[in-house]
Amino acid sequence: MALASSNVEDPYFSRLGDQFGMAARLDPVVWSERPGRLNSSEIESYQRDGFLSIPQLISREEVNQLLQAADRLRQTVDPDQSHVIAEPASRTIRSVFRLHRDYEDFKEICRDPRIVERAEQILGSEVYLHQSRINFKPAFEGKEFFWHSDFETWHIEDGLPRMRAVSISLSLTHNLPYNGPLMLIPGSHRYYIRCVGRTPENHFEQSLRSQRYGVPDQQSLRWLVDAGGISTPTGGPGSAVMFDCNTLHGSVANLSPYPRTNLFLVFNSVVNPLEEPFGDLPPRPEFLGDREMTPLSDL
């Protein structure tokens, strides 16, 4: 597949016309060579695939405490608050955002050195939390989320300038092949998919339930999957997946009787601060893209 040309002013432009495109990534994947919690084999795997599975990041005792807190939150949170997202066709809670600022039960894990230092090692700098949330995928009714690059959305709708962010999905329940686990396309982080369609105002109000803009085309997806396949990392409570902000990922619906609950943290480099959105719209609310850049090492 031919790669599209870049724009001098914004090499990662998207949603400007009616033609999809694919461009080469211009940013590093791993931004430093300093030693840390990740060994050389893990760094190499992350560099190659755009993600890394960690079999056990925190203990089962810690998981149990977090899962209890997540269940309390799900049962008591007001679904009409803007940072609380329900399933597309019900009031069942899908996600609760801004954990690192609003919920005491989660503030400690959001700045845990076992997590933060891995992010700093990949990004080569101090980091802050761009976004934090709990994702619930309830048994039988948890809906799918289509393939997408987080960076494309964060660039166009939040103003994240470069691909210098990493996400960590921490499993609080079993992530099984049949309860809607995260799916990733290995190697897709090396390409930027330009999407089509002008982004409507307040698009986030719909996209967090069912995304229509910032969705890659089928031809690009087929090309990338033919080249890299699809990986579905599974694991028990306390396992985790780190993945690059530009790695294409999604998840299928949960038709099983087993719910899936994950803590999702996005770390951005402090030298990659948010600018005005590149999609010519007002920035999304700060629960989706935090503009307070205090390094986690200072908290």
Image: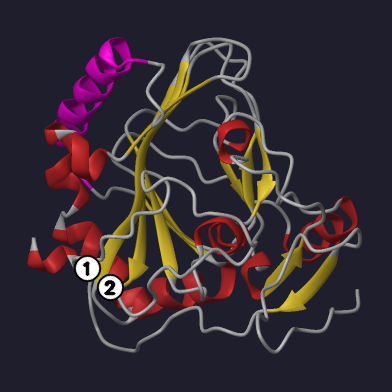
Looking at the rendering, which quadrant does residue 277 occupy? Answer: bottom right
Of 275 and 56, the residue lying toward us: 275
Looking at the rendering, which quadrant does residue 23 occupy? Answer: bottom right
Of 12 and 176, the residue lying toward us: 12
Give coordinates of residue 205: x percent, y percent.
56, 33
Determine the secondary structure under disc 2: helix
The residue segment tinted magenta is: 58-78
Give coordinates of residue 196: x percent, y percent.
82, 56
Q: Quadrant of the C terminus?
A: bottom left
Neighbours of disc 2 within 10 Å: few (<14), some (14-19), many (20+) = many
Q: Which residue is mark 2?
A: 120
Residue at 55%, 67% in the rendered image: 50
Identify the image's colour scheme: rainbow, by chain, secondary structure or one colour.
secondary structure
Of 184 and 217, the residue lying toward us: 217
Amino acid type of the residue tagged 1 in the rendering: Glu
Residue at 46%, 33% in the rendered image: 175
Instruction: Residue 59: tell me if it is visible.
Output: no
Residue at 30%, 10% in the rendered image: 75
